[in-house]
Amino acid sequence: MSKHYSAKAYSEATNIILPPGQLVLMLFDGALRFMGNARKAFDEPNFFRGSEDIHNNLAKTQAIITELQATLNLEAGGEFGQTMYRLYDFMREQLRLANVNRDPEPIKVVQKFLGDIRDPWAQMLEQTEKAGAPSGATSDKLAATC
């Protein structure tokens, strides 16, 4: 089985099994992981390899943030949705600056913001699970606005 086929099959299976709230959590976790990888790449002694790793990991993070932003329901989310939209714009710009200027500081800013969103999201999912809500019903509603 080729790598591409198995990755695609895994992705499709994940979309079928996980509720939207869990998928959002996976996006947060992926973005944080890629930013961590980018920050580590600043220590790479080979300038070209480090630059490529920084760029690739920040591009992946920006793609995730773009996906989070695209899934916002701005009508249902009201002012909160609008605020999140602007925050995601800010994060993408910070990552662009980190990439262009080869500066890890903007990455730290985005990691802080995203971590501050991710942790309460994970707690909400955990509480929803403990409360026995059917199939992540509360997280599905929140995912529609976030």
Image: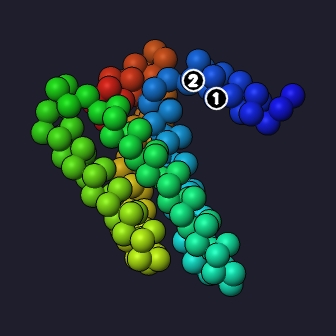
Q: Are marks 2 and 1 in contact (CB under 8 Å)?
A: yes
Residues at marks 2 and 1, CA–CA distance in whole angstroms = 6 Å
Q: Residue at x 34, y 35 (%)?
A: 70
Q: Is residue 119 visible?
A: no
Crowding at label 1, few (<14), some or many (≥20) Cα neighbours within 10 Å? few
Residue 137 lies in quadrant: top left
- As rendered, which of 86 and 53 lies closer to the eye? 53
Identity, as a three-letter code, of the amino acid under mark 1: Ser
Identity, as a three-letter code, of the amino acid under mark 2: Asn
Crowding at label 2, few (<14), some or many (≥20) Cα neighbours within 10 Å? few
> Is the N terminus in the top left, top right, bottom left or bottom right quadrant?
top right
Residue pointed to by mark 2: 15
Seen in the image, is 40 located left or right of residue 83? right
Location of residue 23 in the rendering, given as x and y in whole percent from the top left corner? 50, 33
Q: Is residue 114 visible?
A: yes
> The residue tagged with tag 1: helix, strand or loop?
helix
Q: Residue at x 83, y 32 (%)?
A: 2
Q: Is residue 51 above or below residue 3?
A: below
Residue at the left extreme of this rendering: 79
Q: Residue at x 62, y 66 (%)?
A: 53
Q: Is residue 106 above or below residue 86?
A: below
- As rendered, which of 125 and 91 lies closer to the eye? 91
The way the protein has been coloured in the rendering is: rainbow
Q: Is residue 72 above or below residue 140?
A: below
Location of residue 76 in the rendering, given as x and y in whole percent from the top left corner? 19, 25
Residue at the bottom extreme of this rendering: 45
- Residue 11: mark in rendering: 1
Q: Residue at x 32, y 60 (%)?
A: 93
Seen in the image, is 60 located left or right of residue 6? left
